[in-house]
Amino acid sequence: MRSSYRLALAGAAAAALLAAGCSSSGSSSGPSGSGTSSAANWATETSAAAGGGMNALVAAAKKEGTLNVIALPPNWANYGTIINDFSQKYGIKVNSANPTGSSQDEVNAVKQENGTAAAPDVLDVGMAVALANTTLFAPYQVSTWSDIPASQKEPTGLWYQDYGGYMAIGYNSAKFGTITSVSQLLGPKFKSAVALNGNPTQANAALNGVMMANLAQGGTASDISKGVNFFHQLKQAGNFVPVMCTAATIKAGTTPVCINWDYLSTASVVGQPTSTWKVFVPSNAILGGYYAQAINKNAPHPAAARLWEEYLYSQVATGGQNLWLVGGARPVEMPAMTSNKTIDSNAAAKLPAVTGTPVFLTPTQATDAATYLAQNWANAVK
Amino acid sequence: MTATTAGAQPERAGRRPPLAFTGTLPFFAYVGVFLLLPTGIVLWGAIRNPNGSGFELSGLKLLGNSTVRGYFVNSVLLSGVTAITGAVFGAVLAYAVAVGNPQGVIRRVYLSASGVLAQFGGVTLAFAFLATIGPTSGVLMHASWFYDFPQGIGLIYIYFQIPLMVLVFLPAIDGLRVQWREATENLGGSSLQFWRYVGGPLLAPAFIGCTLLLFANALSAYATIQAWDNQISYVVPQSISAAMTSEVGLAAPNQAQVLALGMVVLVAIIMTGYALLQRRTARWLR
C-alpha cells in the first residue's frame, strides 16, 4: 500500500493486474481434487441431500482440504473465531484473502482469478453487489433453508442473507454523556469528533450511516438529501472528521464518535471498556441492513464451499448462526432459533436495545441514494 | 543518463558489434512490462466500449464532467502547493547542508534523515500526524482546519516533500564551484550580484526540474490522503479507487481507466518538461 504513493501510474498498475487475471482465465481447466472419487459433482449440487447427505459432503470437503474466503476481517461479526473453529472442526485449511476488502473487491477477485486455485470459494457481500452479480453465483440451499425468511433469500439459493444489524452511534459516554438523538451531534461539545466508517459513495456501511441521519432528520428512505444536509451542517460546525473510524482511530481518540453497524461498534470489537463505550440506535431512525452469502459458481473447492455454508447456517451452539450472534450481529435465522430455543440467549441479551419498526432499504432506494451521493456528497462535506 | 552514455561512445565507432545491444535488453524488458504495457492497457480500457466489444471515444467525455474536473483541479492544486513549498524550504535546507563540511557529521545526519523521511508516507505518516500534532494531542485541539482541504493534507505532504527536495537538489548546489564565487568577488561583485547573475541562473533549471519531480510525487500519492481524508474523494487517485471498489453500485472499472489515462497524460506533460530542463542542466554539469 505504501509503495503506491510513488507510483505515477497507480491506475495503470491496477489495470496490469487486471490483465494478468484475464489472461489466466483463458487457460482455465478444471481444478484438481474436486471430488473425483465421489459420485456427486459438488460443483453443481444444490443441496447436501442431493449430493448424498452431510457425511458425503464432509468427506468431499476434507478431500479438497482447502477453502478460500475473502474480505472477512477477524473482528467483524466474530469471523476470526468462525474461521478458526471451522478449520479445527473439519481439518480444512482456510485461506483468508484481503480481509479489509470491500464487497466489490470480492466480486473483482472472482472475475480476475477465475479458473485459478486462488479464486474465492465463497462470498459475503452487501445486497447491492449481490443483486448485481447473480450470474457469478451457484445456487445452493443449506439444510436450514426453511428457517431463512422468504424475503431474505433468492428463491433458488443464488444468495441468502446471513447476518445483519442496525445503524448505530458508538461513543465514549465518559466524554460526551448520554446521546439520545442524532441532532445532538451538531452541538459544540462534539467538535472534531464524529466520523463514518468510510466514504458513502464507496462503502455500504457509510451510505447507511448517512441514511440513518437522514431518517432521524425526517427524511424518507427514498430521498437521502436530508442526511447529506445533516453532514453538511456537521462539517460547518467543525464536528465532522474525515478520517474513517476504526478501532485504531477510536483508541487514538481521533474519532470518539463513530457511526457504523451496531455489531461493528460493540465495546469488544472496538477495544473499549464496556463501562464507558455505548452504542446508541436512535428510535426514530432504526435502519437495518443484512449481508448475504453466495458461492462462486466456479469455486476451486466446491465441496468445501458448500460445507462452509452449512456450517454458517448451523443452529447448534457452536454453529455459525450463534457465533455471529456472539459477535454482536443478528443471524438471519434468529427468529426461527428463538422459537425453537437453539439461540444463545446470553449473547442475545447483550444486543443493543431497539424499540420501534426497523426500515430496510429496497434495492431501488439504495441505488437512488448512491446516485444522489455521487453527485452531492463531496460538495456537502468539503 | 542517455546523454552520458552517448558521450562515452567513440564518435566514429564503425560497425557496432551486434551483441552490445543485448546489454540493454533487461532494461527495455523492464520498462516494457512495468511502464509501456500498463499504459497501453489503460489506453485500451479507456476507449473500449464497457458493455462489450468495439471501441468508442465517448468514455473520454467523462474527463469533461464537472465533478471529474474538480478531482483534477484538486490534484493539481495540492501537488502544486506542496511542490512549491517543499521546493523552497528544501532548497534552503540543501544550501545550508552544502556549505557545511562535506565530510561532516551534520551533512551525513541530514542526508540519512532526508533519505528516510522522503520515503515516509502512507498510512504510517497519517497516523503519526494524528498521534503527534493532531487534534487529540492537545497541540491543535479543536482545530478543524486540520481536516480541511488542501491545508491539512498539504501540511502532511510537505513532510515528505522537503526531504525529497534536499536529496534531489543537493547535487546541483554541490555543482556550484567556489571558484565562481571567488571570480565574482575578484571582479567586484557582491553576494547579491553573484546570486542574481551566476548562482541563480545556474541553479534555476535544476530547481524547476526538482519542483516538477515533487509535483509528480504528490500527484501520484494515494495511501496518505486515503488514510486521512477517507470519507471524501478529493484527488484523482482516490476517485480511481472509488471507481474500482465502490460496493454501493457505483463501481465502473472503465471509468477508472479513463481517469488513469487522464493522469498518464498529466504525468507525461510534466515528465516532458522535466526532461527538457534536465537537458539544459546537463549542459553545464558535464
Image (spheres, coloured by chain):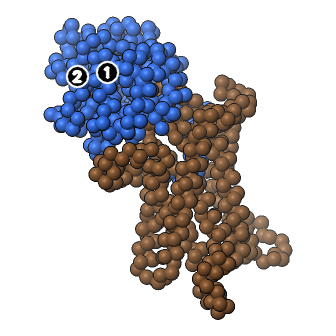
Chain colours: A blue, B brown
- Give me the residue at 60% from left, 36% from top: B68
Q: Are marks 1 and 2 in contact (CB under 8 Å)?
A: yes
Is label 1 in a helix, a strand or a loop?
strand
- Give me the residue at 68% from left, 25% from top: B52
> Against B56, is A225 above or below?
above
Residue B173 seen anywhere in this rendered image of the structure: yes
Three-letter code, disc 1: Tyr
Crowdedness near tag 2: few (<14), some (14–19) or many (≥20) residues, C-alpha within 10 Å: some
> Against A109, is A166 above or below?
above
Coordinates of residue B189 in the picture (x, y in percent): 64, 86
Q: Which residue is mark 1?
A: A166
Q: Quarter-wise, where is residue A355 in the image?
A: top left
How far is the residue under mark 1 from the one under mark 2? 9 Å
Chain letter of mark 1 equals A
How many marks can you see? 2
Is label 2 in a helix, a strand or a loop?
loop
Q: Which residue is mark 2?
A: A352
Chain letter of mark 2 equals A
Name the side, left or right, on which A105 lies relative to A84.
right
Between A234 and B123, the one nearer to me in the picture: A234
